[in-house]
Amino acid sequence: MNMRIIERSFESCKARGLKRIALITIAMLLIPVLADGATLGLPETTARIGYAAGPAYVSIDQANSARNSTWATAQSLIYTDWFMAGTRYWAALRYGQADLDGTVSKIGEHMTFYGARVSIQDNVRFAPGFSPWVGAGLDVSVRRHTRRYTVDSDGYLAEQFPEQTTRSAGLVLNAIQEWAVGRTFHVSASVEQLIDIAERFRETTLAAAILYRF
Amino acid sequence: MYNSFYGFSDRPFALNPDPRFFFRSSVHGRALAYLRYGLEQGEGFVVITGQPGMGKTLLMRTLVADSKVPRLETVEIVTSLLDGDDILQLLTATLNLPVHGLSKGELLAQLRVFLMSRARAGIRILVLIDEAHNLSLRAFEELRMLSNIQLKESAPLQCFLLGQDSLSETLSRSEMVQFQQRVIASCHLHPFEPAECRQYIEFRLKRVAWRGTPELTDGSFRLIHHYTGGVPRRINTFCDRLLLLGSIEQRKVIDEHAVLATVRELAEESSQYSVLDMENELDHPANSSPALSEAGAEGIDVRDSVIGAGSNFAIEEVPLVSEVVRLPEEEFNDSPANVKPPLSPDVVPSEEAAKKPEKKRLVIVDESVLEFEPESRPDPDDMLDARLEDSAHATGRMFQRLWWPARNHNTLITVAISAVVVSILAAGGYGWTRQDNPAPTVPVLPQTSALPDIQTTTAAASDMLITGATPDADASATVAADDGPPLVDVNEDALASVSPYVAVEAPKPVVRETVAQHVEAPKASPKINAEVPVKHERKVSPVDRVVHVTSSETPDHTVAVNSAPAQPPPHSTESVSGVHDSAGSALAAVALPSPPMPDVSFVLPINKNVPSVQPAASIESPATLPASEPGRTSLRSSGDVLTPPPKKPAPVEPAVATEPPIHSELGTLLSQFEAAYRTGNVPQLSRLFAADARTTDASGRRAISQLYRRLFDVTDSRQIGIDHMQWDVASDQAKGTGHFVVTVVEKGEAAPRSYSGLISFVLKPGTDGMVISQLYHEYANH
């Protein structure tokens, strides 16, 4: 039933590929929940929630074939748990804002983006104190572009553009190093790279996170 | 470099310990026998001492390499400059157990469960601690506490301590009495004799395909022994350089010239090679040591070779020798001249003595070169001390081994005579014999009576102990060896003529010199089970084991199982534990020493009606057990409410009832479970579960296997220990509840996580034995 509701909500999406990606993402979120259990030697709950924040360098292709870039701030709510065969999944709900400056050729705008990312990660043990999680996954995002404009050579407003809402899907690569703080908390540092399928949007995110095993 | 010149297949005198080059000298062969005995005992501590370079490590590796003990895991700890906590952490890490982030209590708990799990799997852990003389007293104490861990009658951990002479001194301290009691074998490695030194060199040369080239002359062997002191490592170093020099000079014959040239080279490089006084040797070649005099007799200019050319050879700053005294062995032992020895006819006063009064005298007794301060004649005490240190005489060697901690012979004689007198006073007149004593027997005190019912008595070397016979006889006394006032005043002058190896002929008991020196004779176990035939009607004995709880802060306590009513303490000095059948008759009795006593044990007469033999610990009898269903018997283990006895705590070995087959099967199943868990073997783990098994998390073998596979996937390492199991055995199933400790290192994490709690099993018969029907756990510290 829930799946049908979700499916209907995506009926408006013109890109069927995006809908398929979203369905896979949700399914991946459900699988570990079904397999959860307190095996002898693991805590009763192995899942963790967390919060991450950090700068993100965003770059967007604009309608006039120009590419505008800036630093943004991004925040995430994280949920992670073991997946299968020693891997884990890392799900994040993201929200961020960016202000791109307008020029004669580049459209300035205020961009608000939110979306979800799910990646599957495996641990790579380089050294006893350095064993980052590296993974790959999917990203679905919705971006709201407002206050879009260009300026003339003197810096005065030259043209205003209508607001836009774009949706995108992409491949995300990430590497996360964690450190335990006590029995239930972890802090982590991560770097993520988003590769948009439509190649209109790129993002590199650095983030610090705190995770809690409840 | 010289290998090719002489055609050797390998370096004959490499310094690294290599079991291929283990030379079974008389002392090393004897030591190896002791160590094998200790290894076969599988418990306690084995101590090997010797000065640096004596081959302790090689001896140990040879022992381990040749060991026929099945399922023996050996860990070696070399860095031993450690305190108590450090040794625990290092041992834990050496056993590949997690260390980081664990408190001492967690470390101990982890070690305990690890050792217990290993013991259940039939695996013994042998810890070799090299350079053990560097260990602190706390470290020794921690090791001692670890040795208390026992699984039934076997100890999962055994320690071999290797160290220099100071290790013996440390162990002989009064606060180490408890540790001493756990030393089951010890040996001291002495340097080689000249003949063995030659055999050693030739042995190593033959190991590398030596076929007579280079040829070593007799004199060269003597000189090598003289300069190296018969210490293997020094021999190796020396001979390595000697062969190098020989190859450089294209020598096919290694003679005294080559040896002295090597001495000169080494003396310029380090301070470990020296001679007593070459000048005197040259002035009085007839009185010099044999090796040197022979070298001089063969026309070698020792002065030029050794101290000529301005070499700084007298590095040990040995003063010049003013006179050389030769004393035969007989004079040294028995002559009253030892008290104030006049110069014997062999004494050759040196003319230079008057000119150079600061010179020392060189005294040669049976080829042992001794030095003495000027302006004094050789003092027999000093000579005896020196002989104990240096002599190759068999008696002295035995004496040194026996009384190593107390080298001052005045103390020894005082203690020995005190022990004799106290034994006469306390026990009514009996003495002891030293079975290996080659010294003449000297009757000292008359014997009056022998004590009844004593079968075996052994005493540690550091504590002279004369014990009473029966629990009713208050006839024990301990004479401290080092500290404490002497019990009896002894006229030392009167004793000077008496050999320290006083032997008194008496039938029983026998006080032996050390346990280690009687390897050939089986050591009387302090735990002796004597069984009286009793018809067993029950399938399972009511008592699993008596809990033995120890603490480093408090004396050992024997504790009762299942809160049985406290028994009055026995009125005897011995603590006896036993297992009783329903009629209360003794099935077995264990006689144990009181705490202050060293390694002494009595065997009490087994008598079912002996009222004085009461268990020190309250042993659970069937009447005190909880009501059980017919046909159902509880197997109780440790972990229940434990109450120390009100008086006179004494260490009590576990009294183990004969287990029915099903109990051993339960232990085997748990061991298999622990092993599969530790190794992450899902198929093996799956086979331990019934098809319809249930756990806390899943139902069915397949689901359980999936969960454990997931656990194994997400953890890099795991350890589990299940302990304190209490089984309730019925005909068709067995239910058990106990404690578990799990330590896992999750993927991506550096620090381990430990979980502990309660675990319960329900086992039922499967096609191939017992399988797990239900497994539930509950975390206590999650």
Image (spheres, rainbow, N blue to C red):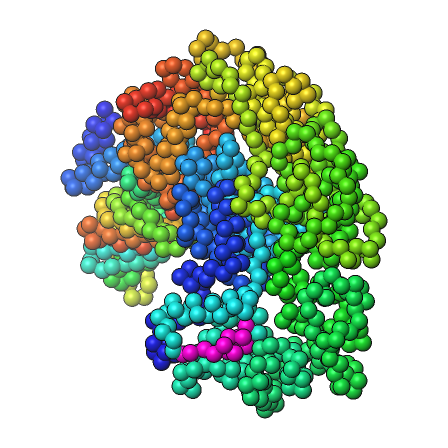
Query: In the figure, residue B340 lies in which quadrant?
Result: bottom right
Question: Is residue B470 shown above or below A166?
Answer: above
Question: Residue A178 location, x and y as percent?
Answer: 41, 48
Specify the quadrant that holds the N terminus of chain A. Answer: top left
Q: Nearer the viewer, residue B496 or A156?
A: B496
Question: Is residue B594 shown above or below A113?
Answer: above
Query: In the figure, residue B667 lies in which quadrant?
Result: top left
Q: Magenta segment, which residues?
A: B214-225
How many numbered marks appear?
0
Residue B90 at least partly seen: no
Q: Say if the magenta span includes residue B220.
A: yes
Question: Is residue B642 shown above or below B341?
Answer: above
Quick check: A124 left or right of A168?
A: right
Specify the quadrant that holds the C terminus of chain A. Answer: top left
Residue B748 at least partly seen: yes
Q: Residue at the location (45% across, 8% down)?
A: B630
Question: Residue B674 location, x and y as percent?
Answer: 39, 34
Q: Residue at the location (45% across, 37% down)?
A: B119
Query: In the figure, residue B522 lies in which quadrant?
Result: top right
Q: Residue at the location (43% across, 46% down)?
A: B73
Q: Residue furthest bottom?
A: B309
